[in-house]
Amino acid sequence: MGAAFIHTNFTAMKRLFFLAVVLIVAGLLWSQDLKTKYEPSIDGTIRGKYEYNTSLEGHRFQVRNARFSVRGAVSPFARYKAEIDLSDEGVTRMLDAYVEMKASEQLTFIIGQQKVPFSTDNLRSPHNFLFANRSFLGKQLAGLRDVGATLEYSFEKQLPLELIAGIYNGKGLYNQKEWRNALSFATRAIYSPSNWEFTLNYNTIQPYELRMHVYNAGIMYTFNQWHFEGEFFYKQYEHNAFVDTKGFFALASYEIPTPKLKAMESISPRIRYDSMSDDNNGLMNATTNTYTVDDVERARITGGINFNLKKPFINEIRLNYEQYFYSNGTANNDNKLVIEFVTKF
């Protein structure tokens, strides 16, 4: 009886042992699957440039961006992104920091620090710039990052349409403790049939005492090696506090494959014209108690060539010359030659 008891217990222990092994192996396999599925990814963009100012005969080197971001998923429905720029012209800035919830294949909710959904040029990341410097519209007029919540809905299964709407503090990234009575609201519609893309954007914002209403329309067309793009910007100030601001750019690019060159994939000659009228950021001049010019009227022609190096990573050299035009007797100290090296990993 004793031997039978021992044998029975030993058999039970073996079963428990093998069951434990099976559970441990299954757990390891599952955790490996989880690790693969939810492992964060790290990427970065570095832009180093040399500029020669032909107006002032001055030189400078800059690290325009040294961006690093971490992104990933914590469940099938929840994703995250955190991005920092260690050198935005020598200044460290926290950029994106948000949680993204996927309610369905079509509907996405985002909350945190993010780009305001307004203007294609504003939303373009540095490694995707077509020129070394973005347009006036994308930088001076609509360079928008803020803290808030965004809803995105895609009609991709029915038609090539995406609708985006969001609500934000309206004070940028670095003033998040202040209680706000006037928020910012933005909407964006993207219709992209075949090789075309059409966008309509609206943003109403009151960072200080004055509310402003901003409108934007964009068009893009790609055919074979050709790429054309343009945007128009229009800003109204409530109570006619300042003259309406207008901005515009148009560009063309042609990609020439270079299969015989070992290190280079293609060469892209590009040209852009952009302009803006006098602009105010919504803050009253404390001395004159009026709304005065923060960014003066100007125009610019940019021409250049991009040298697109071999993959697997984005790697290119941008060679540009910028010719500025000012009105009302404003001195032109901005004409420059730019050579920029860009890598995205």
Image (cartoon, rainbow, N blue to C red):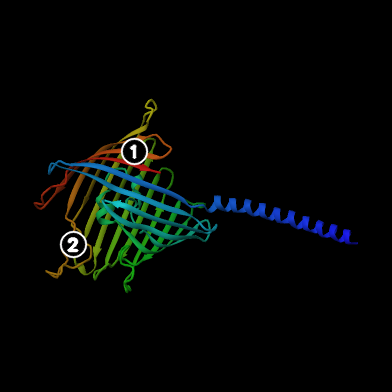
Residue at 38% over, 55% down: 83
Query: Measured from the top left, where is residue 4 in percent x and y?
Result: 88, 59
Where on the picture, by quarter, is residue 225? top left
Of callouts 2 and 1, which one flags the residue occurring earlier in the amino acid sequence?
A: 2
Looking at the picture, tell me which residue is in the foreground, 147 or 302: 147
Using residue 297 as the reference point, say whether residue 187 is left or right of it: right
Q: Is residue 11 above or below residue 225?
A: below
Report the residue at 44% width, 49% height from top. 42
The image's mark for residue 57 is: none
Residue 12 shows in this picture: yes
**What secondary structure is marked by label 1?**
strand
Seen as rendered, the residue at the extreme left is 329
Q: Nearer the viewer, residue 131 or 217?
A: 131
Disc assigned to residue 243 = 2
Dot 2 falls on a residue whose secondary structure is: loop
User: Which image quadrant is residue 56 in?
Assistant: top left
Q: Amino acid at mark 1?
A: Glu
Mark 1 crowd level (few <14, some 14–19, many ≥20, 10 Å Cα): many
- Residue at the location (41% across, 42% down)? 195
Residue occupying the point 23% across, 47% down: 274
Q: Report the label total.
A: 2
Q: Name the residue that disc number 1 marks.
A: 316
Q: Is residue 216 left or right of residue 190?
A: left
The quadrant of the image that shows the C terminus is top left
Residue 117 showing in the rendered view = no
**What amino acid does circle 2 point to?**
Val
Residue 339 image offset from top left, x and y in percent: 25, 39
Residue 269, percent from left and from top: 29, 35
